Amino acid sequence: MKQIVDAKTSGSRKTYHHGDLRKVLLDAALMEIATHGAQGLSMASLTRRAGVAQSAPYRHFSDREDLLAAVATEGFVRFTEVLLEAASNGDDVTALKRMAIAYLAFGEKNVELYRLMFASGLVSGAGSDSALKRAATSSFQPLLERVTASDPESSLISAHVRWGQLHGLVMLKADGFIHDPTEALMGVLSF
């Protein structure tokens, strides 16, 4: 987080100007969500964590829901990048398995972000042409493409079932119902 100190001061308080305030706010929101969950995020807690004025977030986000939608959008973009990277790091035969492992690892490392992305209702309430809806839809494409490559006949249904398995495992692990390591789980899944 890069901060540039303004030479102007009022009393003993220095003012801070951020080169990319939107990114600073999104990063601060991600940290706050990771620590306290999305329900714990308020605009006041965000401004404290980011070290900016209380009015600063409103330059980029109309309200808390707009901010959460932007965080979820960034989460889906990162999630898609993780899946694509996993698919490209090896042969085509094991690409789907590598993606499944990457999916589970992303969910485990980013539990609260994952909940915001998949369990908050933000996507279902987003407009069909919103950045959030596009990012969420795009995150399914790598899995669909890999499943289609291996099973063209029932690709969409097969992709949905595999997605459901992975999503269920992430949520059950996050809620403390499953404690098995990812490697053990992958041994019994059909990936």
Image (cartoon, rainbow, N blue to C red):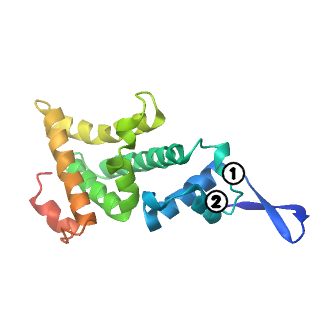
Can residue 128 be seen at all in this image of the molecule? Answer: yes
Q: Looking at the picture, how far across and down is residue 168, in whole percent?
A: 20, 54
In the image, residue 189 lies at what x, y percent?
Answer: 12, 56
> Would you identify the image quadrant in which residue 60 lies?
top right
Give the residue type that dot 2 points to.
Thr
Quadrant containing the N terminus is bottom right
Given residues 141 and 11, the one toward you in this image is 11
Left or right, 48 with reference to 150:
right
Task: Estimate how packed mark 1 is, as few (under 14), some (14 to 19) or many (20 or more) residues with alpha carbons within 10 Å.
Answer: some
State the residue at coordinates (38%, 46%).
80
Label 2 sits on a secondary structure element that is helix
- Residue on which disc 1 sits: 56
Q: Is residue 21 left or right of residue 128?
A: right
Question: Residue 30, relative to residue 137: is it above or below?
Answer: below
> 155 above or below 183?
above
Residue at horizontal 65%, vertical 45%?
Answer: 58
Q: Position of residue 22 (x, y in %)?
A: 63, 48
Helix, strand, or loop for circle 1? helix
> Are circles 1 and 2 on residues that touch, CB within 8 Å?
yes
Residue topped by disc 2: 47
Q: Residues within 10 Å of mark 2 (few under 14, many from 20)?
A: some
Q: CA distance from mark 1 to mark 2?
A: 7 Å
Give the percent coordinates (x, y) of residue 103.
Answer: 29, 54
Please identify the quarter of the rendering in which residue 126 is found. Answer: top left
Answer with left or right where residue 19 lies relative to residue 26. right
| Residue 88 appearing in the image | no
Amino acid of disc 1: Ala
Residue sitting at the far top: 129
Depth check, front residue: 88 or 108: 108
